[in-house]
Image: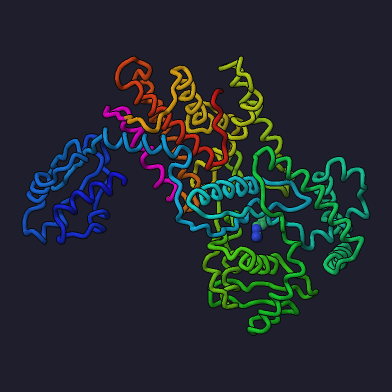
Amino acid sequence: MNNKEIVAKAIFDVVKDDLSLEVITQLLENPKSVDHGDVAFPAFSLAKVYRKAPQQIAADLAEKIASEDFEKIEVVGPYLNFFMNKKMVSQAVIGQIAKEKGHYGDSTIGEKGNVPIDMSSPNIAKPISMGHLRSTVIGNSIAFILEKIGYAPVRINHLGDWGTQFGKLIVAYKKWGSEESVRNAPINELLRLYVQFHEEAETQPELEDEARAWFKKLEEGDEEATKLWQWFRTESLKEFDKIYSMLEVSFDSYNGEAFYNDKMDEIVTLLEEKHLLKENDGAEIVDLSAYDLNPALIKKSDGATLYITRDLAAALYRKRTFNFAKSLYVVGNEQSNHFKQLKAVLKELGFDWSADMHHIPFGLITQGGKKLSTRKGKIVLLEEVLNEAVELANKQIMEKNPDLPNREEVARQVGIGSVIFHDLKNDRLNNFDFVLEEVVRFEGETGPYVQYTHARAMSILRKADFVIDETKEYALDDKDSWEVIKLLQKFPEVVIQAAEKYEPSVIAKHAIQVAQAFNKYYAHVKILTDDEQKESRLALVYAMATIIKEDLRLLGLHAPNEM
Ligand code: ARG
């Protein structure tokens, strides 16, 4: 039971039928200052029932509630301030963490329901962008969080590997490319070809027709077109995989847009049967004015299908394959309308499960306050950013701990981790500026700071030769440890909150709070002093390290034991 539940029950036992347990729970507040205890109850709502002043009611209640769950209950005006019994709570919390370890906070809420998570999903032949990085790390963390509360996440990389741009690429490659240069630097070269196509097409518009013809061939399974497409895809994936392996993110499926090429006819047929398709200038659209949305363009006048057509087929495929509890799309904010349209069309088709599909949008990463864009050739190469982060981490570790045995591995975990943490610590919809030196700092609200706190705790435990014993009772009742204990106690609720909001930042903020509370504790209290509370203090250090490590795991970061 958490503190609010304990307080609610104690009040309920006294007022019984005059207020329901539920109402009491809702009325409870978290006092702003620690001087006002851990939980507060405003007695106003009982004034009508008892026909007494709230102040009087509060005083009466305080007298009647006799429970060893509380150190004291203070009456301040109409408020009842409950001070929890620190010994009992700390004993319960540390004991449970000692027993459950990293599984503290696990639950079965998800009932093993499948949750496909559409994440990362970069476009073939183009560099992976900062936006795709966000999608990758947010999606990965949401997967860990949902798994912890009992769902079965399925990480899907819905690659942008289909569409008219492949017609353009084939034309450009055949005219100006060579096998060798693509092999040497696939994405650079393919991007160069793509840009050249657009430049030349300005003066030679017939190139566009050629491109359309080649995409048509590709859609029809032409051998030469398919071979080239396959090759572009394989080479691009090799480069994407370098980044995924640095981030240690893996996917259950790489079924991208192309996978749905033979699955769109069904969607078109369904739309026709329901008379939802309308002709517009030779193209086929679904009118969505009833939803206050622009029409969804399903087929172009030349018969070519579109992004949304493939997403319709993908949604249906995922429903059939996974019978999902929910289906998530971690995609930038700028595609909000697309996902509204997608859900609306499915709803028109009579698929009620479209209500279980959720777009999880996120904001932009900027540099110097400006949007990063590929168009103007200002591509920030992710691989370089990650390597630089590792370099910076390495430098700082050299200064702090030059003899660290596995320094390179730790530098990788800290450097890459810092980029991930920075991405996840703010509400996902916020835009944020990326300044590498800020990201990799060991102080402030950063990943390295949290990791460092964990490593410091582990070093204390090593020094003391401490081994947790789950059969022992550890308890603390001082003010300094109480702040840490309350944060540990809250962890299971924090996980659920993060899952409900699809918000990894809730976990990141918890990790920062735990680290800050612990460092304060460490500064005030001599943990290793030989007295009768020493074991309990060490058990608290153990519990703190266990939870911080779990916080980091849920975000996709390592917690090195030494750094
Ligand atoms: N490839 C797209 C892009 O880079 C993102 C795809 C998102 N997923 C989806 N099912 N539409 O913009």
Residue positioned 84% across, 55% down in the render: 230
Name above or below for residue 270 compared with residue 416: below
Residue 372 visible, this angle: no
Residue 224, located in which quarter of the rendered image? bottom right
- Please indicate whether residue 155 sits to the left or right of residue 170 in the image: left
- Please indicate whether residue 22 sits to the left or right of residue 197 in the image: left
Q: Position of residue 379 (x, y in %)?
A: 71, 43
Residue positioned 39% across, 28% down in the render: 539
- Please indicate whether residue 312 sits to the left or right of residue 531 in the image: right
Q: Quadrant of the C terminus?
A: top right
Residue positioned 54% across, 47% down in the render: 144
Toward the viewer: 202 or 10? 10
| Magenta highlight on residue 483 | yes
Task: Please tell me how many numbered marks the rendered image carries.
Answer: 0
Look at the magenta stretch and give its main secondary structure.
helix
Image: magenta residue range: 475-496
In this view, which residue lies farthest toward the front? 471
| Magenta highlight on residue 272 | no
Name above or below for residue 221 compared with residue 57: below
Q: Position of residue 537 (x, y in %)?
A: 35, 25
Q: Position of residue 257 (x, y in %)?
A: 73, 61
